[in-house]
């Protein structure tokens, strides 16, 4: 890994063993993108990649009209000079103009990677792991400066980017758009992959061939959303899971976002991602600065599994933090689907006791323990225990759970308030609401104005006290509605464009304070399931509830789709009761277990209601999980058969040293007299002899001949029915 500056040509070459990223100062003084892709040999000058051409209707540089930004690739383009494509940033100056001219002034190359104040970001633990290039640019006319930050990692094909704006001029300006990265690519031969959905059907991969015009996704809901995820892939049409070139781009941010690709009339592609510019406007007075969130770029020529594996390992090791980031996750039992809000201390203790008997390690009390919270019409905001349900308080309950030898976890939804709550009656001004307009409700609740100091202090005091007094081990931080009528009474009119971003910064701040007070605490983020499932959240909470849909068949898709951008250790996945509460489907308990293993693993039902044989199955599942969760949560994950394309789904995880693997396959609908199906395994050591049950096979056999997943049944075998699944442990 190195970052080389070629002074004569004014070019920067960032490279490691796998990738090269080359930036050159263009003839007009702004940085241009010259190359991004597979590592190439370094040389002094790549100026042949700068374009000079003359075409009708173009505009060019006054001193040489043949140089136009329109025909060159920019690092951080603005709109309105010789480039009229969509810009990466836009500043409104004091005189109302919007044209900028940021020119390279100097740069810094440093070891390691700086943190971003108040924002989640990938980090290094040792300066030798990465190098950072800071390119400093200045707009001479106004004195505004901006710094483009690029960090390249030594051991993986990843570059992170972000931008710092500093007003060193004398007049206030307004930042109207500031993407975290912009990447101009020389052609448009890409398939765009986005991960879209809705409540209970999150992160479905959708593919579109890039064509002339704009392809875009985003969120204006105040959170990253289940509708679109702030992660996209651009892959070559011939790339698949196992081979081919692809670029992944993730935004490390949990608020409104935009990711888009513009293909121009000449067939080049401009990709960008960052805070959504709609409803964003950030005034910068002289002396003030603004730091964009970070974006992660990953490149591969080895297919989508390789791309995902790079992100999995980066997020596990250098995005998530704290005591739990690489620890085996506790097997939890959550009472939500078992009781909803209708419980007493005795009823939850009964559920926890059965969990202990089964072998679970953490009991989580979900919604309904505070205020007058008997249904979702009341109580949110009143973070004082409901002693009708829990006479000894949370502390008393936690003590009993701890005495059983279980860890204790608690649900909060700090960002919300019900109109029917003491908090709202005392502070109706504490919500986000537009003066004179109706206050829309979502799940009968409103969103607290997290940008207010008093709101932040109230929530911090309540959470800090409860967590501290009850010695809580785990917090599920929920967020169950989108933001509407976004307006903060605490701030003047001209700052309303800052509200969405300030909101998410305040959420991050509250997380950060609690993390530093309780470094051993495990956070699981949640937003009506997976509506804030993003890289930003993983910096604070190493796991996130994957979806409110706990049906095993639906979960195959949700978890499969999630693995494109996120590690298994981050995907909250539980076995729940049947008929399933979201779909009414009845699936075998074995299949429910086999799906939940490929996530954090856990239970979300009253185990007392299971028949004896099912309870015994649960006990066996927990024994299995305790033995193999380390491998599953930290191994190399491969998608093998997609449930979006097939009646079968298959995936596997291989330990880092390749000595062990767990392979699972699922057949959704039963088939009579099925055809033969084989799946070729991946990632094993070809020369190692592996055991599967009583049989032994070389890695090369398993990877080239494969494993039969649909053998014809024997003459006396009963049909196995729908939703069948198998798990194979492969050990050398
Ligand atoms: C939505 C979450 O996704 C559920 O798991 C549960 O915690 C409910 N909220 C509680 O209100």
Image: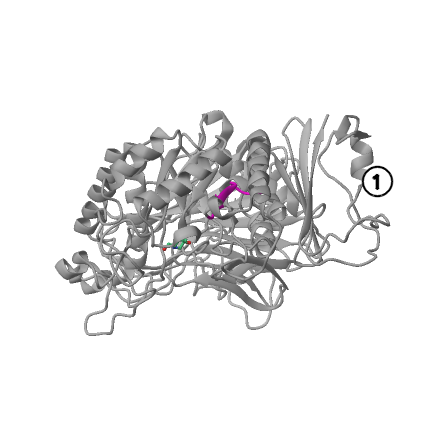
Toward the right, the furthest residue is 715
Q: Quadrant of residue 494?
A: bottom left
Give percent across and percent down for residue 438: 24, 74
| Viewer-closest of 163 and 255 | 255
Q: Is residue 6 shown to the viewer in this render?
A: no
Determine the residue positioned at 62% across, 55% down.
Answer: 186
Q: Give the camera-side residue of 12 and 288.
A: 288
The stretch of residues the image draws in magenta is: 598-605
Colour pattern = one colour
In the rendered image, which quarter contains the C terminus? top right
Q: Residue 247, position in %: x, y?
A: 60, 49
Q: Is residue 399 left or right of residue 598?
A: left
Decide if residue 563 is in sight here.
yes
The image shows residue 291 at horizontal and vertical percentages of 34, 47
Look at the image and say whether residue 676 sits in the magenta stretch. no
Q: Quadrant of residue 531?
A: bottom left
Residue that badge 1 annotates? 705
Q: Nearer the viewer, residue 453 or 349?
A: 349
- Taking the view exactly as shown, the residue that stands out farthest to the left is 426
| Kind of element beneath mark 1 | loop
Circle 1 residues within 10 Å: few <14, some 14–19, many ≥20: few
What is the chief secondary structure element of the magenta stretch?
Answer: loop
């Amino acid at each position: 890994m190195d970052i080389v500056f070629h002074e004569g040509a004014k070019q920067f070459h960032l490279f490691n063993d796998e990738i090269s990223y080359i930036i050159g100062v263009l003839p007009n003084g702004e940085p241009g993108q010259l190359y991004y892709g597979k590592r190439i040999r370094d040389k002094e000058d790549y100026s042949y990649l700068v374009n000079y051409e003359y075409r009708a209707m173009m505009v060019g540089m006054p001193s040489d009209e043949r140089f136009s930004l329109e025909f060159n690739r920019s690092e951080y383009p603005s709109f309105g000079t010789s480039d009229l494509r969509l810009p990466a940033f836009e500043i409104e100056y004091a005189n109302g103009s919007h044209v900028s001219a940021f020119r390279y002034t100097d740069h810094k190359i440093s070891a390691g990677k700086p943190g971003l104040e108040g924002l989640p970001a990938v980090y290094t633990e040792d300066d030798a792991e990465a190098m950072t290039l800071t390119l400093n640019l200045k707009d001479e006319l106004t004195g505004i400066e901006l710094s483009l930050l690029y960090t390249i990692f030594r051991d993986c094909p990843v570059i992170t980017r972000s931008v710092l704006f500093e007003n060193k001029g004398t007049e206030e300006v307004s930042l109207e758009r500031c993407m975290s990265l912009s990447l101009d690519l020389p052609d448009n031969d890409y398939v765009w992959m986005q991960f879209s959905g809705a409540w209970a059907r999150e992160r479905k991969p959708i593919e579109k061939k890039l064509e002339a015009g704009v392809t875009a996704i985003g969120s204006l809901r105040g959170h990253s959303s289940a509708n679109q995820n702030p992660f996209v892939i651009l892959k070559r049409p011939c790339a698949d899971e196992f081979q081919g070139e692809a670029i992944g781009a993730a935004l490390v941010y949990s608020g409104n976002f935009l990711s888009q690709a513009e293909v121009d009339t000449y067939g080049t592609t401009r990709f960008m991602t960052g805070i959504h510019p709609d409803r964003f406007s950030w005034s910068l007075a002289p002396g003030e600065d603004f730091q964009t969130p970070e974006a992660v770029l990953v490149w591969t020529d080895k297919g989508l599994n390789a791309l995902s594996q790079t992100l999995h390992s980066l997020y596990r090791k250098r995005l998530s933090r704290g005591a739990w980031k690489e620890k085996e996750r506790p097997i939890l039992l959550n009472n939500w689907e078992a009781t909803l809000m209708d419980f007493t201390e005795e009823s939850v203790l009964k559920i926890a006791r059965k969990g202990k008997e089964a072998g679970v390690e953490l009991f989580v009390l979900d919604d309904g323990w505070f205020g007058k919270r008997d249904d979702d019409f009341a109580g949110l905001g009143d973070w004082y225990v409901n002693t009708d349900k829990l006479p000894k308080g949370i502390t008393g309950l936690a003590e009993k759970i701890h005495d059983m030898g279980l860890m204790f976890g608690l649900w909060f939804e700090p960002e919300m308030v019900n109109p029917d709550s003491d908090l709202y009656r005392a502070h109706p001004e504490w919500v986000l609401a537009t003066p004179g307009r109706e206050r829309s409700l979502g799940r009968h609740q409103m969103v607290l104005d997290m940008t207010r100091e008093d709101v932040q202090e109230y929530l911090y005091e309540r959470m800090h006290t409860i967590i501290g007094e009850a010695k809580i081990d785990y917090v599920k931080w929920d967020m169950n509605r989108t933001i509407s009528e976004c307006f903060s009474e605490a701030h003047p009119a001209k700052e309303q464009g800052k509200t969405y971003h300030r909101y998410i910064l305040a959420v991050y701040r509250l997380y950060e304070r609690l993390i530093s007070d309780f470094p051993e605490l495990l956070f699981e983020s949640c937003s009506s399931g997976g509506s804030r499932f993003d890289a930003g959240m993983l910096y604070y909470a190493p796991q996130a509830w994957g979806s409110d849909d706990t049906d095993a068949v639906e979960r195959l898709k949700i978890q499969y789709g999630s693995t494109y951008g996120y590690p298994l250790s981050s995907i909250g996945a539980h076995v729940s009761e049947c008929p399933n509460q979201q779909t009414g489907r009845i699936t075998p308990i074995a299949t429910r277990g086999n799906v939940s293993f490929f996530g954090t693993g856990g239970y979300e039902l009253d185990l007392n209601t299971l028949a004896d044989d099912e309870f015994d199955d649960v006990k066996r599942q927990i024994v299995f999980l305790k033995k193999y969760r380390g491998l599953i949560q930290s191994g190399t994950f491969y998608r093998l058969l997609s449930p979006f394309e097939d009646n079968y789904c298959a995936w596997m995880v291989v330990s880092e040293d390749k000595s062990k693997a767990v392979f699972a396959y699922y057949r959704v609908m039963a088939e009579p007299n099925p055809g033969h199906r084989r799946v070729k395994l991946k990632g094993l050591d070809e020369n190692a002899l592996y055991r599967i049950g009583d049989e032994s096979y070389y890695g090369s056999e398993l990877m080239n001949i494969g494993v039969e997943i649909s053998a014809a049944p024997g003459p006396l075998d009963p049909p196995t029915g729908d939703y069948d699944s198998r798990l194979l442990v492969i050990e050398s």
